[in-house]
């Protein structure tokens, strides 16, 4: 099942990012079979991060919650998130990012 996590950062998140980025990146690598796309969101090129987006291939919503809430970035409660199921238009078309 494909789930999308959309993260909204608080002001405090910039400090969390500065300290915990290596652990966060290691976490993403460890779970790359389930967190298939991940990245930060900005309001403008070169601006501060204001959130993030993950596309996950997981068996359940509960597994998506587990992945999000165990991430080193999330452990500090400096971001909110929402989960939604996502289905790509033109499912037969392969997309490489």
Image (cartoon, grey):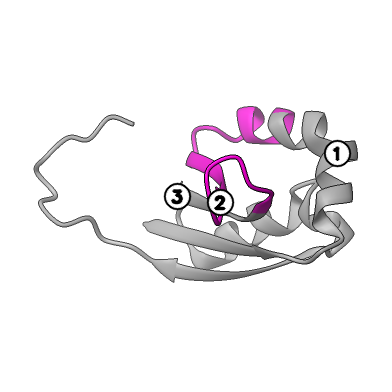
Residue 41, label in figure: 2
The foreground one among 45 and 19 is: 45
Identified at 63% across, 47% down, the residue is: 47
State yes or no: residue 91 in magenta. Answer: no
In the displayed structure, 4 sits above or below 57; it is: below
User: Closer to us: mark 3 or mark 1?
Assistant: 1
From the image, tell me which residue sits under label 3: 55
Identified at 44% across, 70% down, the residue is: 84
In the displayed structure, 37 sits above or below 87; it is: above
Q: In this rendering, would 71 be left or right of 8?
A: right
Mark 2 to mark 1: distance in Å?
16 Å
Number of marks in picture: 3
In the image, the segment drawn in magenta is: 26-49
Q: Earlier in the sequence, mark 2 or mark 3?
A: 2
In the displayed structure, 63 sits above or below 47; it is: below
Among the 4 quarters of the image, the one containing residue 20: top right
Pick the quarter of the image with the C terminus: top left
């Amino acid at each position: 099942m494909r789930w999308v996590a959309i993260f909204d950062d608080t002001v405090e998140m910039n400090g969390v990012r500065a300290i915990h980025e290596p652990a966060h990146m290691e976490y993403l690598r460890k779970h790359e079979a389930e967190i298939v796309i991940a990245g930060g969101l900005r309001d403008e090129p070169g601006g501060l991060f204001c959130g993030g987006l993950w596309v996950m291939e997981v068996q359940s919503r509960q597994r998506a919650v587990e992945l999000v809430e165990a991430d080193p970035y999330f452990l500090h409660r400096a971001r909110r998130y929402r989960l939604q199921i996502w289905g790509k238009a033109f499912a037969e078309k392969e997309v490489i990012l």
